[in-house]
Image (tube, rainbow, N blue to C red):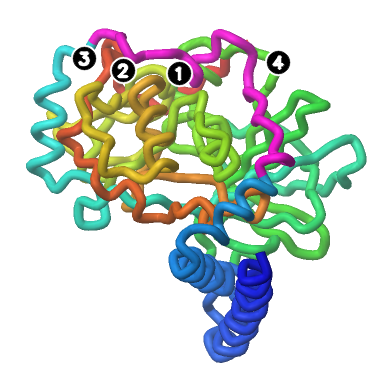
Amino acid sequence: MKTMKAAVIFASGFLLGICVAAIAYGIHRSHIDLALKAQRVRDHAFMALDRASGGLLGAQVRAAKLKHIVPPAPYFPPGSIWAQDVSHAPLDPQSSTMIAWLSDAGGWGNDNKMQIDLGIRVLQADAGTPMVPLREGTDWIYDSDNISEVPLPAGGGFEGHSGYGCPDHGDCHLIVVDRGAGKLYETWRTEYADNVLSADYAVVWNLNRVYPPSGLGDQCTSADAAGFPIAPLVFNADELALGSINHAIRFTLPPPRIRAHYFVHPATHAGGPSGPMSAPPMGAHFRLKASFDMSNLTPPARVVATAMQKYGMFLADEGSIALTAQNDQDTEMKYAELGFDSHSLRALKVTDFEVVDGGTPIRLTDNCVRNP
């Protein structure tokens, strides 16, 4: 016991020293988000120390934290398409063609590696969270919701950033859940200055509604190109720690590997990809084959793979990093404590998947008609 206590004290000091060093180094690299960089260094250090202790350090941390984790509540009522069991759903007639073409075209982005983007944040709000004015951005999308303010939780941040700054002018999604009010706020290309938010797209999802297959409405986009909500399709470290993900998962492909001008439900928009008719359309519903051998995956990676078999994953946007998970700044458990990182699912190839039948592809017209 004394040996373990000494190891924990040493680990804490070691991690603190590494974080300080990372921050000092980052002073000369202003274009790097210091907090995220320090977190990555800290996570790698924790994993190394856990291995050195034979897994005892990580086991103690996990056991203590599991007692405080509340199982995530579903975002939408029963019947939501994002939580439907499709393990026995029929295949798309073109499933084999799409999978073969995608494999030959290079598979996933990032040199055909199934990598995970751990940068997206899902923030929690309540009745006491201050509301901040929202203004239209310079490239405001016409079918956005007409909302004038958004709750902005203290200590939150945009996608890929530790705070409310978007220095790279990237996607910078802002995702805020107010379960008490039954609302999910999602914005895209978000900026924050002088206590005012601006965004190029904004939507408020009704968490008390079961949306139809046409979602917000055919030909309508969202903060994701396909017209999906983002938060219900990203998994997090607490779910991995509890051993189950009870919903479908979001994934992306490079634009040339997505069929141009077409989408299938539950997608309602096609974005701007450039792939041929043999490519999967936006909204394609991939399912990990039941025959996939999970024996070489780590326990948390098996949790994700099992969800891919039961609920599948939806093609939601264009991108080079296939999967998206919630950043662990906003969860009780941390990925490093689970031995999980952005490369934990690299063993999964395109040919390990099949495509669930999504119905007749719909041609993009951009004539958005919102569902009542």
Q: Whole-percent x and y of residue 235?
A: 51, 38
C-alpha separation, residue under disc 1 versus residue under disc 3? 21 Å
Q: Earlier in the sequence, mark 1 or mark 2?
A: 1
Q: Residue at x 41, y 21 (%)?
A: 311
Quickly name the residue at label 3.
92
CB under 8 Å between discs 1 and 2: yes
Is any atom of residue 342 visible in this view? Answer: yes
C-alpha separation, residue under disc 1 versus residue under disc 2? 9 Å
Instruction: State yes or no: residue 72 in magenta.
Output: yes
Q: Whole-percent x and y of residue 66?
A: 66, 41
C-alpha separation, residue under disc 3 versus residue under disc 4? 31 Å
Quickly name the residue at label 4.
208
C-alpha separation, residue under disc 1 versus residue under disc 4? 21 Å
Quickly name the residue at label 2.
362
**Residue type beneath disc 2:** Ile
Quadrant in which the C terminus is drawn: top right
Callout 3 secondary element:
loop
Q: Earlier in the sequence, mark 2 or mark 3?
A: 3
Q: Whole-percent x and y of residue 147?
A: 74, 35
**Residue type beneath disc 3:** Asp
Magenta stretch: helix, strand or loop mostly? loop
Q: Which mark is residue 218?
A: 1
C-alpha separation, residue under disc 2 versus residue under disc 3? 15 Å
Callout 2 secondary element:
strand
CB under 8 Å between discs 3 and 4: no
